[in-house]
């Protein structure tokens, strides 16, 4: 089975964004460049962790290699919506990060959900030995960013994640506009 590698080295634009109202949002990573537009779907927690790990990667690159890393900006930056059409190429199962010392760039790779991951999610037994490189035949999105572009991505990703439903002050679960059944209130609406 053939797979596609959507490489943007560097992209004109690389952002995290959503489609839909809070509580029913679908999260996307979207890369644009060279007349191409690629959107891949992922979970909110993946976007949050990606921003966190990119922050750690930049700090480590600065510490170990002396790379100039921009400070977080107080300005809003890219706050435009996702480019349309938002057509999902694939759903992300694995995210990979690397720092290329030679070019002083961050490499982000989003790899499609594989059969083994889908089987685990469905609860099917895994009788086979896993392949050594199960991701070799999966679609992927590869993006190469400068530290400045990485910082902008991190800031936007955090804004997108935090723009959802506010958490319940008692249990931490998201509050719907009509409230929710709070376990700390023995199931009464909050």
Image (tube, grey):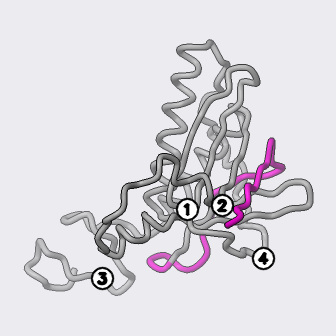
Sequence-first disc among 1 and 4: 4
Residue 151 percent across, percent down from the top left? 64, 38
Sequence-first disc among 3 and 1: 1
The mark lying in front, picked from 4 and 2, is 2
Residue 146 percent across, percent down from the top left? 73, 33
Q: Nearer the viewer, residue 164 or 46?
A: 46
Q: CA distance from mark 4 to mark 2?
A: 20 Å
The mark lying in front, picked from 1 and 2, is 2
Task: Specify the label residue 22 is tagged with.
Answer: none
Which residue lies at the image location 59% right of the left edge and 46% below the top edge?
155
Residue 68 percent across, percent down from the top left? 67, 19
Report which residue position mark 1 lands on: 92
* Label 2: how many Cα within 10 Å (few below 14, some 14–19, many 20+): many
Which stretch is magenta? Answer: 1-24
Report which residue position mark 2 lands on: 139
Where is 89 relative to 189, above or below? above
Where is residue 28, by image quadrant?
Answer: bottom right
Report which residue position mark 4 lands on: 85
């Amino acid at each position: 089975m053939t797979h596609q590698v959507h490489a943007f080295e560097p992209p004109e634009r690389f952002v995290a964004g959503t489609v839909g109202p809070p509580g029913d949002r679908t999260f996307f990573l979207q890369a644009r460049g060279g007349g191409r537009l690629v959107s891949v779907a992922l979970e909110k927690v993946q976007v949050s962790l990606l921003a966190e790990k990119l922050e750690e990667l930049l700090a480590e690159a600065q510490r170990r290699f002396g790379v100039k890393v921009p400070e977080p900006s107080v300005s809003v930056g890219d706050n435009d919506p996702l480019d349309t059409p938002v057509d999902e190429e694939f759903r992300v199962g694995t995210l990979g990060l690397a720092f290329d010392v030679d070019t002083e760039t961050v490499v982000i790779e989003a790899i499609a959900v594989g059969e083994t991951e889908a089987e685990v999610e469905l609860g099917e037994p895994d009788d086979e030995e896993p392949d050594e490189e199960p991701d070799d035949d999966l679609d992927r999105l590869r993006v190469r960013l400068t530290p400045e572009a990485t910082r902008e991505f991190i800031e936007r990703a955090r804004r997108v994640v935090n723009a959802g439903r506010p958490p319940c002050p008692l249990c931490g679960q998201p509050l719907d506009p009509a409230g929710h059944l709070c376990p700390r209130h023995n199931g009464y609406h909050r």
